[in-house]
Amino acid sequence: MQYGSKRRSDRRIVWKRDPDIGEGFVPTQLWRHVEKIRAPVIYVPGGASAIAPRATQEQLTLRSPQAEVDTMSGLGHYPSNEDAAGFLDVAERFLADR
């Protein structure tokens, strides 16, 4: 909470996120950089998040074959916040395989 939220001038506490994040991301020119990554990569989306649709996840594994996608069913865009223990299990399995 300390790093993911902020207090507004009206004293309300809000997330430090783009308010339009629910609309999805705009296409970017980042794929050319992703293709250069050689290290093992894991992307852990929440299954209920529409931010990075399945087509984007497939592009990740096509452009960066060493990348893995491990979806956490039923969670939103921040699965590490919603199920920290489950997220750590995924991360520990990924690191143990390296």
Image (spheres, helix red, strand yellow):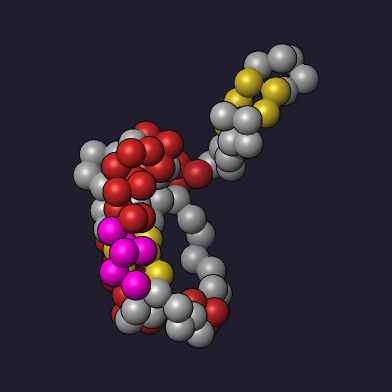
User: Residue 55 appears in which quarter of the rendering?
Assistant: bottom left
Quadrant of the frame with the C terminus: bottom left
Residue 49 seen anywhere in this rendered image of the structure: no
Residue 79, picture quadrant: top left
Q: Does the magenta run of residues contain 76? A: no
Give the x, y percent position of residue 38.
45, 83
Q: Residue at x 43, y 36 (%)?
A: 81
Q: Magenta span covers which residues?
A: 93-98
Name the residue at the left extreme: 73
Q: Is residue 86 visible?
A: yes
Is residue 26 positioned above or below 50 on the image?
below
95 within the magenta span? yes
Coordinates of residue 92 in the picture (x, y in percent)? 33, 55
Q: Is residue 80 above or below residue 93?
A: above
Between 68 and 11, the one nearer to me in the picture: 68
Residue 45: give x, y in percent of width and height.
34, 52
Q: Main secondary structure of the magenta part?
A: helix
Q: Residue at position x 40%, y 74% from top?
A: 40
Quadrant for the N terminus in the image:
top right
Q: Looking at the picture, does residue 62 appear above or below residue 16?
A: below
Q: Residue at x 24, y 39 (%)?
A: 74
Name the outermost residue toward the front.
96
Q: Is residue 93 left or right of residue 15?
A: left
